[in-house]
Image (tube, helix red, strand yellow):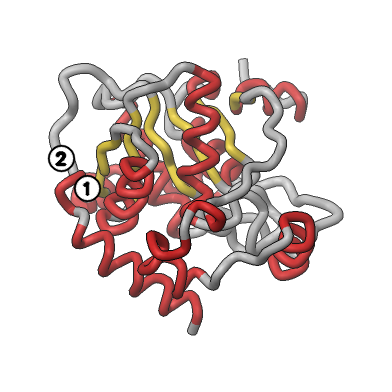
Amino acid sequence: MRRLLASAAWLLTGCALSRYQVTQAPAEPFDAVIVPGCPSEDDGALSHCQIGRAGQAALLWQGAWARNFIVSGSDVHTPYVEAEAIAEAMTTLGVPPERIVLERDALHSDENVYYSALLADQLGFQRLAVASNASIASWLCGLLVEQGRSCAAVPMDLGALRAYLPLHEGALRALHARRVDPWEPLTAREERIARANGHGRPPSFVFYPLHGWFGPSHRPIAPAHPNPITWAERLRDYDILRP
């Protein structure tokens, strides 16, 4: 029920922010397109959501929309890092792994863009976009604009995805993310973070439509980010870098 209420909240606010949406490729590619994560299946296979977002990113790469991507999402609802699962799918679809920057800390949608923007600052990326479902992309762009950044919301082209993804279904269905072990469930992690920060985070179904009322004290408190790491570098860590 909470997920349903949160979804309804950003659907309504996202529709109100549709002015950020762009449907034509920019004259110059964005420095980076942020791809927010979503959970893997329970066995680490790609979910329908992850396949869609990876497919959208691949089409944007082919259409010269972006120089780089920042893929965001931790091991939130399953013991598989969302950013890595989507990055693996993007690489399978032809996006160079050295062009994919990983953001592996975000637990919520607002953290997806907040932490990704911090990585963008480190890398000198200024022209940013968010690629996702239309309402989500628009709402997340609104958060970036509130932070004084430029942003464009790139909604999914469902027709193009329906034509493109079946060509790669076998390769995508064969992928499985690497399990995080030991894994800390979301509730336990949020309790630990709240103790460290001295306050908890409002529930998403409350926070999303009313985020402006909570003030800066409820902005995500960023973890100690390491130097930005690309998917190519992460693959070297796994010792499975493709030739």
Image quarter of residue 101: top right
Compare marks 2 and 1 and give the one earlier in the sequence: 2
Say which amino acid is labelled 2: Thr
Helix, strand or loop status at disc 1: loop
Which residue sits at x=75%, y=61%? Answer: 189
Work out whether residue 77 or residue 168 is closer to the camera in this orientation and state it: 77
Between 75 and 237, the one nearer to me in the picture: 75
- Choose between 194 and 3: the one closer to the eye: 194
Q: Do the residues under discs 2 and 1 have CB atoms within 8 angstroms? A: yes
**Within 10 Å of the Cα at label 2, are there few (<14), some (14-19), or many (20+) other Cα atoms?**
few
65 up-or-down from 196: above or below: above
Q: Amino acid at mark 1?
A: Asp
Q: Which residue is mark 1?
A: 157
Q: Position of residue 179 (x, y in %)?
A: 75, 51
Q: Residue at x 19, y 51 (%)?
A: 159
Task: Give the number of the mark in front: 2 or 1.
Answer: 2
Q: What residue did someone put label 2 on? A: 23
Q: Residue at x 64, y 59 (%)?
A: 76
Q: Position of residue 93 (x, y in %)?
A: 43, 33
Q: What is the quadrant of residue 61 in the picture?
A: top left
